């Protein structure tokens, strides 16, 4: 649970609050209070529990997940369900004369819509977990370091990559692996134009594309910002560059739609690859590939 995430979910939090406020206001506006003798406290206990649990689910989603498509769908669906649940709860305190039929439709329809949206969100969450599980099974040591997983992309962090490289170098007398570094071109421009939430969403989608183009033995990590680092065991330089080139083409052909207007944004990346040398440590290898990448970005490589 990360309470600081609430600041990144202001719109979704406001939506949940609006759901509660609107349901109470609507009921009070068209109904009259029942006498205490006509109130069923057992019904209030049951229906109040549903409303309270819906609010708790929304809260825990907002403090547990970063912004994104799945988080938005979960909260929107639960907010629709919460609206119906609150109407049902407030009904126990109110008496309606001529508007009961219309209110019944208003009460039932949002719940059904909310269940549909939540079903979609849960399916997307399932796909999200499959991708994460696929990553967790890629080139891991026997002890999984879950605290080193980047929460935005669900990839391992640069520290995890360093530990894997150092382990490979320590256990292999003659290093036989390659690494590649990928840099998303003009990512800072995209962030300024569309906002950090869309930037995070872009990083997640690009991470999925990278994973889909790797072999089962390869490892992808988020290096820093818009940079990714790939580890290719038992791989020569030309093969590593070939895989990186395939990833570059896959990303270049995917349209990202960050705005409601449906505008399509395509992305290019620059990459560099290096093979391990005798006497290397992780930092020397990463510095070497990083320098090569910076040179490619400055001078324009033939492939990157």
Image (tube, helix red, strand yellow):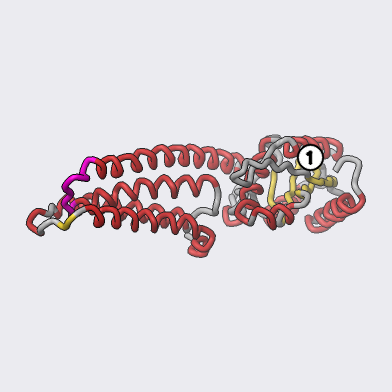
Q: Is residue 96 magenta?
A: yes
Front-most of 288 and 31? 31
Q: In this view, does 28 lie above or below 136?
A: below
**Magenta-drawn segment:** 92-101
Q: In which quarter of the image is the C terminus?
A: top right
Front-most of 79 and 42? 79
Q: Where is residue 153 in the image (x, y as percent from the top left)?
A: 62, 49
Front-most of 90 and 197? 90
Q: Is residue 252 above or below residue 1?
A: above
Q: Position of residue 80 (x, y in %)?
A: 38, 46
Query: Main structural element of the magenta stretch: helix, strand or loop?
Result: loop
Query: Crowding near pointer 1: few (<14 within 10 Å), some, many (20+)?
Result: many
Q: In this view, does 129 lie to the left or right of 185?
A: left
Q: Position of residue 107 (x, y in %)?
A: 29, 44
Q: Which residue is drawn at 60% across and 39% down?
A: 134
Q: Position of residue 238 (x, y in %)?
A: 86, 37
Q: Can residue 141 be seen in this view?
A: no
**Residue occupied by mark 1:** 244
Q: Could you say whether the residue bearing mark 1 is in a helix, strand or loop? A: helix
Q: Is residue 39 above or below residue 4?
A: above
Farthest residue toward the front?
98
């Amino acid at each position: 649970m990360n309470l600081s995430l609430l600041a990144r979910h202001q719109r979704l939090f406001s939506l949940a609050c609006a759901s509660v406020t609107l349901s109470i206001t609507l009921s009070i506006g068209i109904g009259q209070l029942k006498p205490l003798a006509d109130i069923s406290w057992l019904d209030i206990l049951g229906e109040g529990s549903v409303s309270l649990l819906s609010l708790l689910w929304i809260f825990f989603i907002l403090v547990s997940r970063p912004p994104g498509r799945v988080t938005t769908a979960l909260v929107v669906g639960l907010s629709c369900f919460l609206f119906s649940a609150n109407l049902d709860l407030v009904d126990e305190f109110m008496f309606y004369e001529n508007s009961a039929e219309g209110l019944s439709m208003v009460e039932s329809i949002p719940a059904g819509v909310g269940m549909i949206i939540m079903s979609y969100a849960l399916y997307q969450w399932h796909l999200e977990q499959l991708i994460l599980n696929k990553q967790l099974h890629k080139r891991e040591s026997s002890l999984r370091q879950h605290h080193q997983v980047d929460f935005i992309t669900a990839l391992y962090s640069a520290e995890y990559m360093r530990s894997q490289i150092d382990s490979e170098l320590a256990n292999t007398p003659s290093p036989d692996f390659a690494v590649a570094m990928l840099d998303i071109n003009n990512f800072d421009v995209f962030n300024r134009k569309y906002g950090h939430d869309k930037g995070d969403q872009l990083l997640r989608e690009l991470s999925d594309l990278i994973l889909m183009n790797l072999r089962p033995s390869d490892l992808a990590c988020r290096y820093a910002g818009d940079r990714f680092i790939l580890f290719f065991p038992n791989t020569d330089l030309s093969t590593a560059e070939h895989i990186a080139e395939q990833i570059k083409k896959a990303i270049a052909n995917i349209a990202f739609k960050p705005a409601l207007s449906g505008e399509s944004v395509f992305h290019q990346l620059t990459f560099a690859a290096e093979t391990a040398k005798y006497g290397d440590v992780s930092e020397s290898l990463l510095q070497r590939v990083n320098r090569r990448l910076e040179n490619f970005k400055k001078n324009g490589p033939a492939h990157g």
